[in-house]
């Protein structure tokens, strides 16, 4: 299938300027498999469709009557697309997506077989999902978790099933997924931002959160993947000496995409487009075999769903091309890791991007208002934002001298920094000048329009302003981006609410609106100076400097997670209605548990690999060398033999040293793991894994990687980096 399609495209290319056939044209196939608004109009009664659109646009609740009518139309459409089953599609805290398929098949009142899909099953289901992580919110005897339709994300058909995006909540109402709090955060920041935007324009009725993801990933050949138990079980190589040629020539970055990879991407893009994912950009990344895909940004809930969908699609399509996709943040030591840059902005129903500099001073005051509020929010909750992206896997990437450091700071670029400095130090009385025509001027240098095309790039920053949006770069490639975006939305919502209270208080005292805004902006700028950093985030000096500034410099993931339960975080999430205390407790538990489980698995796989693969290979090579030494002794005189055997004896000892060190460390590691496994408290267990297991695992790896360099290539039992990393 896949290759036929790719062949068709290639034929089209070969016969240029002949057109790309319609079946391959993006504009034709886009959303082909999605129950879009146009299709809703076609398949659902017109009075119902209007009500449905109204509730979709205005965050209203769905009535059962509407659900029933919608279900009838949705089933008809889905069956025409070949669907025989339906499933609620949700995003539990495992990080992936979950589905439980039910057939449309049923019996009618008279016992005759039929296809049935009612409003009640569209609306709500109770998947037997007691095994998903819930951090203690649901005990298994009260295992009910409900999935409920999210009408703001359209249903779609994949293969033989109709997928209905849903939230996943406990019987008692607590969120058990990423989508529920993401939706709450979108509402919270939307309301808070609308109120602030109303200082500038009363016509603003709604503010949307926009998200554009850049998904990085590695591809490896499936056969080689299957020969690496560590890749199969943990998603990364637990050992492997770097290849002589890696990324030092930067010859992979933006290079020609290998044909086999292009075939994969072409099929992937087609399938993604059909599902309404607006794929736009594809390119080679820095590391060999590393690539990136970026769809056009969308409303954040949809964009986040699309990212999840894209990831599962990538895994599926990769199989057709004998590839495996690696979403792990650091599948290969010594080679760049993968992130998922989250480009985030706020936009109004009037079509204004609140984070884009404008053409006039009034618009720019609005821009500065929102910019400064984001800075203030990120400053106040920098530790929490880091916790939102912290995981066992992302830990390998952060602070790795090629990725954002484990400190959250904001890069703004020279021009914005200069403008903000001027504003901070401007005299309020002279700062705002309103002329006779009631036009306002900022008494500071205008924010230049060229900014948009001219933002400096700083790849070392975890959170960078890029002209009309912020780019949260510290998010891990395997993460559900909802976790980071909901935290960002929530902190900004809280800050915008505080900002409005402060401005309103000044206005209530009789101050003019612009002056009040200016005063509070200046205060915010003064308070959050320390979050601004344009220098080299990789440098040692920055670690010291950040500590002095009071930014969170914690490097242990289990301790980063503590941020969720800090008083400021609990208050912030509570006041914005995004997560309550019980949910925060549960999420922290899940994060700690997830951390420990990942390390438990890695440590087991490492132990097995080393004892069953590496040590036997080392011993075999040692035996060959020993036999050689003996043979030399038999053939040559004692004096001659001593000289001839010198190198081999050195090598034998070297192998022995590594091998015995490995065996000793593995024993130690197994003991520590057994001890950790018996710790009931999730936090304490995660800390033990971090403090005790990780250093041992690193030590073992170093010995193994040294062995890889000296042992006969023919005896080495695992595919090496040079084989894994270069697709031809
Ligand atoms: P780069 O690699 O230079 O950062 P890309 O073009 O690869 O840029 O990706 C940029 C991403 O940012 C895309 O997903 C794009 O749609 C998204 N984006 C652009 N403008 C906005 C915006 N205003 N809000 C959110 N995302 C945006
Ligand atoms: Mg980018």
Image (cartoon, rainbow, N blue to C red):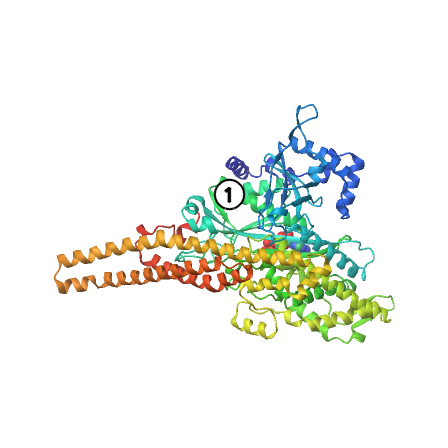
Does dot 1 land on a helix, a strand or a loop? helix
Above or below residue 611? Residue 532 is below
Q: In this view, does 56 lie to the left or right of 438?
A: left
Which sits in the foreground, 282 or 340?
A: 340
- Residue at the spot 64% in from the left edge and 45% down from the top edge: 144
Residue 32 sits in which quadrant? top right
Q: Position of residue 373 (x, y in %)?
A: 71, 65
Which sits in the foreground, 452 or 97?
A: 97
Query: How crowded is the residue under tag 1: few (<14 C-alpha within 10 Å), some, or many (20+)?
Result: many
- Name the residue furthest left: 637
Q: Is residue 677 left or right of residue 523?
A: left
Q: Where is residue 649 in the image (x, y as percent from the top left)?
A: 23, 62
- Residue at the spot 66% in from the left edge and 34% down from the top edge: 78
Q: Is residue 687 left or right of residue 352?
A: left
View quadrant of ligand 1: bottom right
- Name the residue furthest front: 141
- Residue at the spot 60% in from the left edge and 39% down from the top edge: 100
Above or below residue 226? Residue 39 is above
Q: Where is residue 708 in the image (x, y as percent from the top left)?
A: 35, 57
Which sits in the foreground, 389 or 518?
A: 389
Count the numbered circles shown: 1
* Disc 1 target residue: 318
Residue 229 in sight here: yes
Residue 334 in sight here: no
Q: In this view, does 567 lie to the left or right of 332?
A: right
Above or below residue 107? Residue 621 is below
Q: Position of residue 145 (x, y in %)?
A: 65, 46
Which sits in the foreground, 129 or 459?
A: 129
CB at disc 1 and ligand 1 closer than 8 Å: no
């Amino acid at each position: 299938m896949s290759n036929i399609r790719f062949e068709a495209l290639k034929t089209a290319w070969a016969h240029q300027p002949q057109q790309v056939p319609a079946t391959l044209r993006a504009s034709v196939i886009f959303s082909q498999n999605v129950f879009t608004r146009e299709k809703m109009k076609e398949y659902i009664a017109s009075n119902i469709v209007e009500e449905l659109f109204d509730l979709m646009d205005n965050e209203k609740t769905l009535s059962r009557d509407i659900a029933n009518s919608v279900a009838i139309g949705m089933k008809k459409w889905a069956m025409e697309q070949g669907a025989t089953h339906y499933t609620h599609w949700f995003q539990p805290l495992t990080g992936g997506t979950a589905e439980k398929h039910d057939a449309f098949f049923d019996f009618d009142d008279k016992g005759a077989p039929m296809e049935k899909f009612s409003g009640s099953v569209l609306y709500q289901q109770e998947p037997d999902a007691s095994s998903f992580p819930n951090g203690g919110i649901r005990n298994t005897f009260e295992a009910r978790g409900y999935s409920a339709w999210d009408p703001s994300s359209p249903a779609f058909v994949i293969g033989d099933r109709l997928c209905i995006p849903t939230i996943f909540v406990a019987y008692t109402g607590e969120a058990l997924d990423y989508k529920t709090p993401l939706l709450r955060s979108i509402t919270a920041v939307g309301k808070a931002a609308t109120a602030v935007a109303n200082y500038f324009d009363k016509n603003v009725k709604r503010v949307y959160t926009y998200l554009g993801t850049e998904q990085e990933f590695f591809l490896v050949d499936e056969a080689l993947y299957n020969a690496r138990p560590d890749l199969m079980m943990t998603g990364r190589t637990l050992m492997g000496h770097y290849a002589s040629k890696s990324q030092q020539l930067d010859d992979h970055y933006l290079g020609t995409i290998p044909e086999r990879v292009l075939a994969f991407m072409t099929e992937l893009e087609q399938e993604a487009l059909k599902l309404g994912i607006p794929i736009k950009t594809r390119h080679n990344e820095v590391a060999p075999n590393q690539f990136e895909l970026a769809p056009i940004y969308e409303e954040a809930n949809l964009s986040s769903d699309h990212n999840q969908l894209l990831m599962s699609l990538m895994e599926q399509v990769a199989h057709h091309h004998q590839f495996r996709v690696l979403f792990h943040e650091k599948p290969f030591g010594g080679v760049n890791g993968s992130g998922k840059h989250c480009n985030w902005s706020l936009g109004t129903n009037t079509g204004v991007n609140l984070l884009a500099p404008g053409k006039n001073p009034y618009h720019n005051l609005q821009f500065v208002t929102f910019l400064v509020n984001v800075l203030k929010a990120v400053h106040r909750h920098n530790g929490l934002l880091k916790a939102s992206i912290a995981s066992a896997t992302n830990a390998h990437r952060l602070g790795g001298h090629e990725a954002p450091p484990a400190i959250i700071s904001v890069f703004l670029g020279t021009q914005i920094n200069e403008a903000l400095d001027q504003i901070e130090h401007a005299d309020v009385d002279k700062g705002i000048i309103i002329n006779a025509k009631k036009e306002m001027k900022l008494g500071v240098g205008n924010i230049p329009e060229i900014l948009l095309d001219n933002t400096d790039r700083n790849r070392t920053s975890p959170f960078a302003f890029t002209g009309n949006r912020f780019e949260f770069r510290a998010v891990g490639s395997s993460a559900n981006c909802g976790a980071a975006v909901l935290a960002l939305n929530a902190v900004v919502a809280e800050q915008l609410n505080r900002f409005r209270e402060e401005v309103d208080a000044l206005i209530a005292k009789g101050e003019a609106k612009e002056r009040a805004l200016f005063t509070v902006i200046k205060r915010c700028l003064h308070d959050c100076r320390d979050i601004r950093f344009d220098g080299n985030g990789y440098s040692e000096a920055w670690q010291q400097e950040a500590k002095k500034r009071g930014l969170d410099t914690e490097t242990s993931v289990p301790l980063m997670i503590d941020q969720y339960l800090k008083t400021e975080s609990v208050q912030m999430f509570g006041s914005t209605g995004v997560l309550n205390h019980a949910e925060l407790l549960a999420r922290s538990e899940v994060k700690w548990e997830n951390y420990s489980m990942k390390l438990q698995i890695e440590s087991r796989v490492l132990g097995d690999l080393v004892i069953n693969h590496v040590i036997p290979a080392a011993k075999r090579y040692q035996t060959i060398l020993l036999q050689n030494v003996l043979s030399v002794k038999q053939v040559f005189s004692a004096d001659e033999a001593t000289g001839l055997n010198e190198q081999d004896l050195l090598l034998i000892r070297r192998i022995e040293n590594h091998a015995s060190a490995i065996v000793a460390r593995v024993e130690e590691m197994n003991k520590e793991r057994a001890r950790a496994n018996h710790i009931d408290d999730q936090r304490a267990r995660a800390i033990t894994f971090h403090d005790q297991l990780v250093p041992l695992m690193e030590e073992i790896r170093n010995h193994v990687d040294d062995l890889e360099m000296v042992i006969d290539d023919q005896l080495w039992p695992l595919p090496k980096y040079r084989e894994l990393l270069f697709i031809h």
